[in-house]
Amino acid sequence: MSADLTAYLPLIVIALVALAVLVWIISRTGRRARVTDEDGAPGIFRDVLEEGAAPAARNQALIDAPRGIEIIQGELSAMANAQVTGLAPLGTDAEAGPAPEPAPTPAAAGPADDLTRIKGLGPKLAALLGEFGVTTFAQIAAWTPQEIERIDAKLGRFAGRIVRDQWVEQAKLLAAGDETGFTARFGNNG
């Protein structure tokens, strides 16, 4: 080190320590809030997080205010976005009530098929379709475009799979027991 730097080194260290102390003091006073009495008279400075400190008066206005979604969209939409509705079972609509159960087709009376044999329809989708009352290939094979649209709207992030993966065409072949035709057109699913 040069002679000039070694001569000023103790002064630099003292200045850095003084700066650190000053920053600490400013940060400590910044944590304090002015607490006022009920009549608005200024009180003492103290930490608002201290034991026994009253909540800030400005927060009470936020607590008492109506929820923003109730103002913008009305009470029913606010109820639809509530926690209770978010945890409701699939197929429920807070504004319209529970979705009506689909009328079982004559083929639905039989035992349930393994819907996961349809390509693009995994265990989660099979369980979801089961909640809608769809358990057989014959039911899917009989879907009309309106039913496809209605069911597709309930599939959430899986929407679009019915048409894209050709579930109805696959189900028609599987419901008819045409394993050869199914394998020739859609491949072996196993």
Image: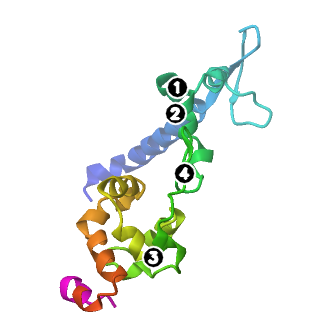
Q: Amino acid at mark 2?
A: Ser
**Closer mark to the observer between disc 4 and disc 2:** 4
Mark 4 sits on what residue? 100
Residue shown at the point (34%, 49%) measured from the top left: 7
Mark 2 or mark 4, which is nearer the start of the sequence?
A: 2
- Mark 2 touches mark 1? (CB < 8 Å): yes
| Mark 4 vs 1: CB contact within 8 A | no
Q: For the view shown, which residue lies furthest in the front direction?
A: 106
The x, y position of residue 117, in whole percent, is 37, 82
Q: How is the image coloured?
A: rainbow
Q: How far across and down, in percent of the image, does residue 18 sit? A: 49, 39
Amino acid at dot 3: Pro
Q: Nearer the viewer, residue 137 or 88?
A: 137
Decide: few, some or many residues near mark 2? Use Cα within 10 Å; few <14, some 14-19, many ≥20.
some
Q: Which residues are magenta?
A: 182-190
Residue position marked by numbered label 3 in the rendering: 123
**For this rendering, which residue is in front, 189 or 173?**
173
What label does residue 77 carry, if any?
Answer: 2
